[in-house]
Amino acid sequence: MKNNLIAACLQLTSSSDIYKNLKETIDLSNKAIDKGASFISTPEVTNIISLDRQKLKRSVFMEKDDPFLIEFIKIAKKKSVWILLGSIVIKDNKNKLYNRSYLINSKGNIQCKYDKIHMFDVKISKKESYKESKIFKPGKKVVVTNTPWGKIGLSICYDLRFPELYRKQVMMGAKLITIPSAFTTTTGKAHWHNLIKTRAIENGSYVLAAAQYGKNSLKRHTYGHSLIVSPWGEILAEKKAGKGIIMASLDFKKLAKIRAKIPSFRAQILK
């Protein structure tokens, strides 16, 4: 098992234009690879951002035809890197929509996939509300998989607010947690940094949190601040604004030492 990983998170401003989003994601991924990244994560809804369910159904693809999957499978295999499409919107043969993460390994195979479990159904203010359950079919399965650096747990955005998910992942062996996101500006300013650092600390795990940033549509503004955080809660890299890349070296020997000092990641039963 490898002890060191050069990881990258991409920060995007995805729109409703799938092919424009694809070009920008490929360009940034290639830049990260050129800088030495072996693992790349993109944000939530990398391929398209829209709150219009009918538009999404018309615009997105089934898994076998999706251009993001087709292109990033090629890149992963050609460059021998691992790529997490933080999430893309996918439809099935019954026209149901899924907010789904895909982890592609360095051989160009889909290592695993994860459907977002917790739907973002909230009313932030009189002018700002979201009802993801009307758009997407939620997942039911906690996903942890093997990589050359140890096990990794997958999640998406609003999942961040449910600590029991991450405790389950750590019980399943996860040392690295991915939380690709499209946090709203309102909730991001209030909670983003605290929640990301808390998940890292309480689980003794590295966290990769690639994020959407800026004006994605007339009604959607995202917070940015992509983060890579250590198991000690240190911010190793942050992209506060704009599109771009952050990178950091993850040391899994250091993770083991932190877990040995403060083993709070172990499951505890309240009595």
Image: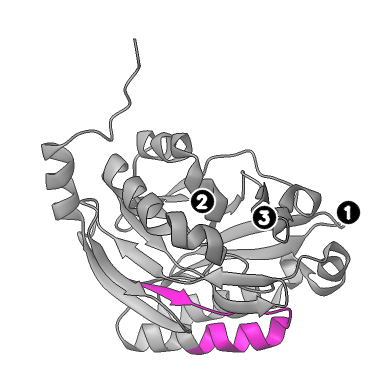
Mark 1–mark 2 contact, CB under 8 Å?
no
**Which percent across, then down, holds residue 229?**
29, 60
**Residue placed most toward the observer, 130 or 105:** 130
Q: Is residue 259 magenta?
A: no
Mark 3–mark 2 contact, CB under 8 Å?
no
Amino acid, disc 1: Lys
Q: Secondary structure at mark 2?
A: loop
Figure quadrant of the N terminus: bottom left
Q: Nearer the viewer, mark 1 or mark 3?
A: 3
Dividing the picture into quarters, in which one does residue 54 lie? bottom right
Find the magenta span and give its range: 7-27
Q: Is residue 153 above or below residue 173?
A: below
Q: Nearer the viewer, mark 3 or mark 2?
A: 3
Q: Residue at x 54, y 62 (%)?
A: 186
Read off the residue under disc 3: 125
Amino acid, disc 3: Ser
Q: Earlier in the sequence, mark 1 or mark 2?
A: 1
Q: Is residue 183 visible?
A: no
**Residue placed most toward the observer, 150 or 194:** 194
**Which percent across, then down, holds residue 131?**
74, 51
Read off the residue under disc 2: 155
